Image (cartoon, rainbow, N blue to C red):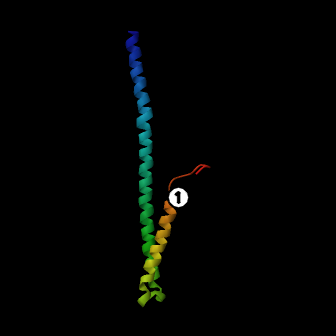
Amino acid sequence: MGRKRESGELIDLLGRYLRQETVDPLRASGRFLINGVLSALFAGLGLVLLAIGGLRGLQEVNFFAGWWSWLPYLMMAGALSCMTALVLSRIGGERGLDG
């Protein structure tokens, strides 16, 4: 009778250990991933709306009438390129002293 109880406890212990080491970390990383994806989507949408608003505002300036009408597009493309370069330079997290 004692061995059966011990083997049942061992199976129970093994099940709890597997859940602790596999399922719980996957749940935590899933929440982290969902929050990251939603944050990226909302930040991207906000950046697009700001770029459209900035472009529209630049188009209203009378200096950019006629032949210069392409300049606001170039300015917004430059601004978005700078933002992209800034974001890409920040990807990768914190680095140690050696790199």
How far across and how far down the image is residue 67, in percent? 42, 89
Residue 60 sits in quarter? bottom left
In this view, 76 is above or below 9: below
Number of dots carrying numbers: 1
Neighbor class of circle 1 (other Cα within 10 Å; few <14, some 14-19, many 20+) is: few
Determine the secondary structure under disc 1.
helix
Residue at image coords 48%, 88%: 63
Q: Nearer the viewer, residue 17 or 84?
A: 84
Residue 2 position within the rendered picture, expressed as x and y whole percent measured from the top left = 41, 10
Q: Which residue is mark 1?
A: 90
Q: Quadrant of residue 46?
A: bottom left
Q: Residue at x 41, y 15 (%)?
A: 6
Camera-nearest residue between 62 and 86: 86
Q: Which residue ends up furthest to the top in the rendered image?
A: 1
Q: Position of residue 61 (x, y in %)?
A: 47, 85
The furthest residue to the right = 97
The structure residue drawn at horizontal position 42% and vertical position 85%, both measured from the top left corner, is: 69
Q: Quadrant of the N terminus?
A: top left
Q: Residue furthest front?
A: 98
- Whether residue 7 is situated above or below residue 46 in the rendered picture: above
List x then y, in percent, for residue 36: 44, 53
- The front one of 38 and 78 is 78
**Residue beneath the point at 43% across and 63% down:** 44
- Of the residues shown, which amino acid type is indicated by label 1? Arg
Q: Is residue 12 above or below residue 57?
A: above
